[in-house]
Structure formats: structure tokens, C-alpha cells
Image (cartoon, rainbow, N blue to C red):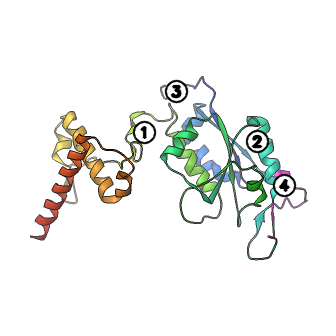
Amino acid sequence: MNENTINTTKPLTIAIISIFPEIFHAITNYGITKKAIQKEIIKINIVNPRNYTNNKYRNIDDRPYGGGSGMLMAAQPLKLAIEYAKSILGYNTKTFYLSPKGTKLNQKKILILSKMKCFILLCGRYKGIDERLIRNKIIDEEISIGDYILSGGELPAMVLIDALCRFIPGSLGKEQSRKDDSFYNGLLECPYYTRPKVFDNVKVPNILLSGNHKKIKIWRLKQSLGQTWMKRPDLLNKIILTKEENDLLEQFKKETVKLKDNKTT
């Protein structure tokens, strides 16, 4: 699929429940997500739950029972907004709530989501949502992008969609780019260099200037293994390395130790 090709298959459709629809201009008007929308690879519908409130001020928040600080998003308008989204996408459509209590988002989950035909993302605000939306199975699953607190679910939703677009064929200029990404094969990416050949007295590794693509491929695999070993060793515990990969990793370790020894002498 080239840059100007229109997708002839049904696009992945995502309905977003948010009280701040304008925030999503950041992904609908820029970058890979914009291109995916233009090529009809992905479709985004935004539903504002304020349209389903029963008060003249369109307030969607209320005080929590039992007291305490902060406000909660009320259950009724959120439920109605989800039901409206399902009336368009299908009543079996799954609803995911972006929440710090959720399962941590990773590349494996992104791949699963990219293969779905449609789903709903609920963006919370304030202290969160009424628990009955979760207990009554109106929410199918909670998803977190990290162990920290944000002001709402809009940014996590955009992170999820941006990551997901990279997995949908036709959204990237070169499909190989996705396969070279960190975490695609369980490892971190290798280092990359561009012009000039020397910057701040540091020269591009000679192997990358050699033109020998077979050796460059091996070098990049070794660097990828080494970067993972140094920065995210926990990832290596989750994958089974081949003999070649083990040998390359051992080479990297020895080269790293030798380099440190040379710097201390």
C-alpha cells in the first residue's frame, strides 16, 4: 500500500468517551495517526458524555459518598455515552477504561488491540469513575500506561492509539520500521547514527560505513542485545535467545568490560 492508496478493507474503528474532544486534534491532525485516518486505515469517533447529563449545566462530576477530597465522574452519563458508541459499533464491542489501576500496556497488548475490528476507550477525569461501571461489567478491562497519575485518560488514550497505528499495515511509510522498533521482538533497538560522520569528536562506527549489509545486520543485533542487557535486563528473562544471539551478547559484554578497563588505565 503506497502513500496515496485508500484502504479498501473496513478500518479499525475506535470510539473515545471524553469530556475534552478537542484534545484529540493532536493525533487526528498530525503524524502517523493523521495519515492512517486519511488513508481510512483507522477511524476515530469521539463521544462527549456531557451530552448525556440531565442537568442544565451539563455537569458530569459529583461528590463521592463517604466524603473525602475530589470529585467523581457520575455513572449514568458515562453508561449512556458507552451505550451510544455501542449502538454504532456493535453491542459486543469491548470497552477499555484508561486507569492507573489497570493492566500495564505493552507491545503484546497493542498487537492484540490492533487486530480488533473496533473498541471503546473511556477517558476518566477527576478522581475517576463510579465503581458500579466496573462492577456491573459496563467496563470490560482497565488499562494503564504506567505507575503514575495523570489528570485524565486522554493522554493515555492517545499513547495507545499512536502505538497501535504502527501495527496496522499501511500506516507506516516502510513496514520494516515497525519491525525495527524497540520491544517488537522483545529487545530494545540498536543505536542509530546519521550525518555528519564525526560529531562532538565521536565518529560513526566503521561497520556502518562499510557497506557490508550482512555484517551491519549482525552488528545491529549485537547492539540490540547489548542495549537490552544494559538498560532493561528484565526483558532478557522473558525471551529465549538463540545460540547466535547468546554468542553475540557474550561478545558485547566482553567488549564493554574491555572498554571500561581501557578508560580506567
Q: Residue at x 33, y 53 (%)?
A: 228
Q: Which residue is mark 3?
A: 4
Q: Give the residues in magenta.
A: 50-65
Instruction: For the residues labelled 4 and 3, say whether their Cβ atoms are less than 8 Å apart.
Output: no
Does label 4 or label 3 sit earlier along the sequence? 3
Spatial CA distance of label 1 from label 3 is 20 Å
31 sits left or right of 125 in the view? left
Give the class, few, some or many, for how many residues have Cα within 10 Å of label 4's Cα (few <14, many ≥20): some
Does label 2 or label 4 sit earlier along the sequence? 4
Q: Which mark is residue 85?
A: 2
Q: Is residue 222 visible?
A: yes
> Is 149 in front, or is 57?
149
Q: Position of residue 5 (x, y in %)?
A: 53, 25
- Using the image, determine if residue 92 lies above or below residue 137: above
Identify the amino acid type marked 3: Asn
Q: Position of residue 172 (x, y in %)?
A: 47, 36
Does label 2 or label 3 sit earlier along the sequence? 3
Position of the C terminus by quadrant: bottom left
The quarter of the displayed image where residue 244 is located: top left
Q: Which mark is residue 76?
A: 4
Label 3, secondary structure: give it. Answer: loop
Spatial CA distance of label 2 from label 3 is 30 Å
- Using the image, determine if residue 40 lies above or below residue 250: above
Does label 1 or label 3 sit earlier along the sequence? 3
Spatial CA distance of label 4 from label 3 is 43 Å
Give the class, few, some or many, for how many residues have Cα within 10 Å of label 3's Cα (few <14, many ≥20): few
Q: Is residue 26 magenta?
A: no
Identify the amino acid type marked 1: Arg
Q: Position of residue 240 (x, y in %)?
A: 34, 44
